[in-house]
Image: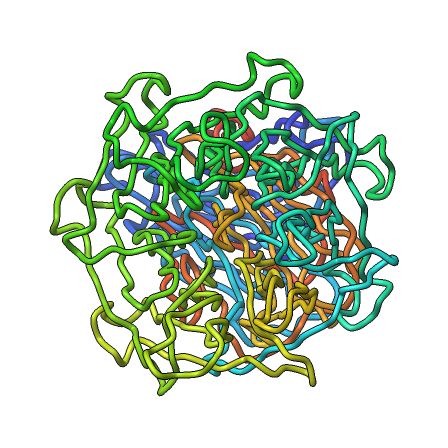
């Protein structure tokens, strides 16, 4: 701060202490947004001497001590200005007064921009203009990332980065494996999919052997804050018999922000609809943490989709009319569950039969959500189904179909969404198909095909689920069609990867890697999985040898140490093939102890929002519009690397924010709760935060 020059005019600026939340703040950057005829330039009938506002400056209440400020914008014709001012002290008990001076034609126009943004700021950006900091900032154990943004479109399920220091790995060999088969003395083998709740990965139990009577309910859980190779990071719980029901064999799961909900499949004798859920706020191994309800629709449910409120269990086979475990009768009965209603109330569950659309729109395996539409992935018939969540669930007019068989669509299990395109995961073949969700579902021009056979010299045909890391779409290897005369297993480990930055039909956009031996283990035969933002975890099933299923979890690292943090407007929750979630705003960090993440699990409404993530070495917090929406423990120093800080995108990626970025601030300190509450009050209503006084003439 310096002694202010003398100017002929001034206006008082009174900061409303009721907007300063709970505690006093020091050296606080205040957004000043004013509009008044006297603030026009002299040529426009006002008293500002310079058309660029060079004579504008701010002082403390004494009228002499000049404050650091940054003039962001000045309109001499309208008398409007926007500036940031560093205020030494903000009281939460009494109003603070500043002064705005102007009118000196001899003013030099010195602005103390760097003084506004103290050294703890690694980056400050207004719109597209960087005013302080650089991507070379040093990271340790504290961080605050803020963004003032306006989202556009319905992209609740789109990975939309706001502020990130996160670059994916270009190499395709970062696999690791752990045999969790005997965790806690249980047979933790044979899983159909997995789901991530922000800290833990849960694997969905199916069977221990190929015999269909070997169904089990041993839910495997891994703590992503622990060492992957440490048995203490793993635990298991036998959920059989929950609430007196035969709760076994589940085909994928969803996470609604509190509960993990498992998709019912069969009990070895027949298909069932006994929905199982776990309360993540309670102990994992306590029976009181688990509930079950029979929805009375004994069909094979295969995967699940979520629109943020409702779960849609994807129908496979009809077990009610044709006897136990038959696959001769295909089902189109979509079971919908309201996650905001009473779990055990029959009214919570509704059914729509897609056979009302066509006799061929039956038997699906996995679902997806693009922010408005739910998609059901055809397992057998090649006819995809789309449901408009803005329509009536029971009205056939809310549903549409597309026959993709002329595109040579064959069997599929699961789908992957990259924010625009929906990729169908080819089962037992290599014919890849994608749909452009920004185009008409029923228009042939909206669909593309590519035969990925023999990518990178490997047999790349036959997948089960997949995931998206912001750049690449990965397809999880399961079973393939063995060429005539070849005496090899149908089960394989040839991961297929598509670079979304390249053309879908260009073979150069595709690569593959054989992960069949990892960390000395045979890592073959996986059925979808889950993604924690950095690592993908495959769900182990069967390696082609003998009758026993296996429990060798395969993990792939998409980022390594190239990632530090990523604040996101929304994130992709159906990331694995058979799992579902709608995370909404999220905050991810990558520390020396691994990744951590939190999410709001509620999509943002249209309009401007203040989204902020804070990490203090012990706790990770997510703030939206001055409200704490998520919090969880964390540990470790942030990974420091050469990745740039990117706004509205990921480095080396294709994921983008669809909206307007107004302000960005990245600081290497952990801001307090009240600091963030006050910052939101200032951003959302700057003219209410500060009252403009009458113009005064100053004696010179």
**Residue 54 appears in the picture as rendered:** no
Residue 593 in which image quadrant:
bottom right
What is the residue that sits farthest to the front in this orientation? 323
Q: Residue at x 45, y 30 (%)?
A: 322
Judge left or right: residue 589 versus residue 387.
Answer: right
On the image, the x and y values in percent for residue 42 come to 27, 40
Decide: is 546 above or below 411: below
Q: Residue at x 74, y 53 (%)?
A: 220
On the image, the x and y values in percent for residue 524 come to 57, 73
Q: Nearer the viewer, residue 254 or 218?
A: 218
Q: Residue at x 54, y 80 (%)?
A: 515
Decide: is 336 above or below 62: above
Q: Nearer the viewer, residue 645 or 181?
A: 181
Task: Point out the image quarter for the N terminus.
Answer: bottom right
On the image, the x and y values in percent for residue 161 come to 46, 55
Q: Residue at x 14, y 53 (%)?
A: 406
How many numbered dots are placed on residues in this image? 0
Q: Nearer the viewer, residue 211 or 365?
A: 211
């Amino acid at each position: 701060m310096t002694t202010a020059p003398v100017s002929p005019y001034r206006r008082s600026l009174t900061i409303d202490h009721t907007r300063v939340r709970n505690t006093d703040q020091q050296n606080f950057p205040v957004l000043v947004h004013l509009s008044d005829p006297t603030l026009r330039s002299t040529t426009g009938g006002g008293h500002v001497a310079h058309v660029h506002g060079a004579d504008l400056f701010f002082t403390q209440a004494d009228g002499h001590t000049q404050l650091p400020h940054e003039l962001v914008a000045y309109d001499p014709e309208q008398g409007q200005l926007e500036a940031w001012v560093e205020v030494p002290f903000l009281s939460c008990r009494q109003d603070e007064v500043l002064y705005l001076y102007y009118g000196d034609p001899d003013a030099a126009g010195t602005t103390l921009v760097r003084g506004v943004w103290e050294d703890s700021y690694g980056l400050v950006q207004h719109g597209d203009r960087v005013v302080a900091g650089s991507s070379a900032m040093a990271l340790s154990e504290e961080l605050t990332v803020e963004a003032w943004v306006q989202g556009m479109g319905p992209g609740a399920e789109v990975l939309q980065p706001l502020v990130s220091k996160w670059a994916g790995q270009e190499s395709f060999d970062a696999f690791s494996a752990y045999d969790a088969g005997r965790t806690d003395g249980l047979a933790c083998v044979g899983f159909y999919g997995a789901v991530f709740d922000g800290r833990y990965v849960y694997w969905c139990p199916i069977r221990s052997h190929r015999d269909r009577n070997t169904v089990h309910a041993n839910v495997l859980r891994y703590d992503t804050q622990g060492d992957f190779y440490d048995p203490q990071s793993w635990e298991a719980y036998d959920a059989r018999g929950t609430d007196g029901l035969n709760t076994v064999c589940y085909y994928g799961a969803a996470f609604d922000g509190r509960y993990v909900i498992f998709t019912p499949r069969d009990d070895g004798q027949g298909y069932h609809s006994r929905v199982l859920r776990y309360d993540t706020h309670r102990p994992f191994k306590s029976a009181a943490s688990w509930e079950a309800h029979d929805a009375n629709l004994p069909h094979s449910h295969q995967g699940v989709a979520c629109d943020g409120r409702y779960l849609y269990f994807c129908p496979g086979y009809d077990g009610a009319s044709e006897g136990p475990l038959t696959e001769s009768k295909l089902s189109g009965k979509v079971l919908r569950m309201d996650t905001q209603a009473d779990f055990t109330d029959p009214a919570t569950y509704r059914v729509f039969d897609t056979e009302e659309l066509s006799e061929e729109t039956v038997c699906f395996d996995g679902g997806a959500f693009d922010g408005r539409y739910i998609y059901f992935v055809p397992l057998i018939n090649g006819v995809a189904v789309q449901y408009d969540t803005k329509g009536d669930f029971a009205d056939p007019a809310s549903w549409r179909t597309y026959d993709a068989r002329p595109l040579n669509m064959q069997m599929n299990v699961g789908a992957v969404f990259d924010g625009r395109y929906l990729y169908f995961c080819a089962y037992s073949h290599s014919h890849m198909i994608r749909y452009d969700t920004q185009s008409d579902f029923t228009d042939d021009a909206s669909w593309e095909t590519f035969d990925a056979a023999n990518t990178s010299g490997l047999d790349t045909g036959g997948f089960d689920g997949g995931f998206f890391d912001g750049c690449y779409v990965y397809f999880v290897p399961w079973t393939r069609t063995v060429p005539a005369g070849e005496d090899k297993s149908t089960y394989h480990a040839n991961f297929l990867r598509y670079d979304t930055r390249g053309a879908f039909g260009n073979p150069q956009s595709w690569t593959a890697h054989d992960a069949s031996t990892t960390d000395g283990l045979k890592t073959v035969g996986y059925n979808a999985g889950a993604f924690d933002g950095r690592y993908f975890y495959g769900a182990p099933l069967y390696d082609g040898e003998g009758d026993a299923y296996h429990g060798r979890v395969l993990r792939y690292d998409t980022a390594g140490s190239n990632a530090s943090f990523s604040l996101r407007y929304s994130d992709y929750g159906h990331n694995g093939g058979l799992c579902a979630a709608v995370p909404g705003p999220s905050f991810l960090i990558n520390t020396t102890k691994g990744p951590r993440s939190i999410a709001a699990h509620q999509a943002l409404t249209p309009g401007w929002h203040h989204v902020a993530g804070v990490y203090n070495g012990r706790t990770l917090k997510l703030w939206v519009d001055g409200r704490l929406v998520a919090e969880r423990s964390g540990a470790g120093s942030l990974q420091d690397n050469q990745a740039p800080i990117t706004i509205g995108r990921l480095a080396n990626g294709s994921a983008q924010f669809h909206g307007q970025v107004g302000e960005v601030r990245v600081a290497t300190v952990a801001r307090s709760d009240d600091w963030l509450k006050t910052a939101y009050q200032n951003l959302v209503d700057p003219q209410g935060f500060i009252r403009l006084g009458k113009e005064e003439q100053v004696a010179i």
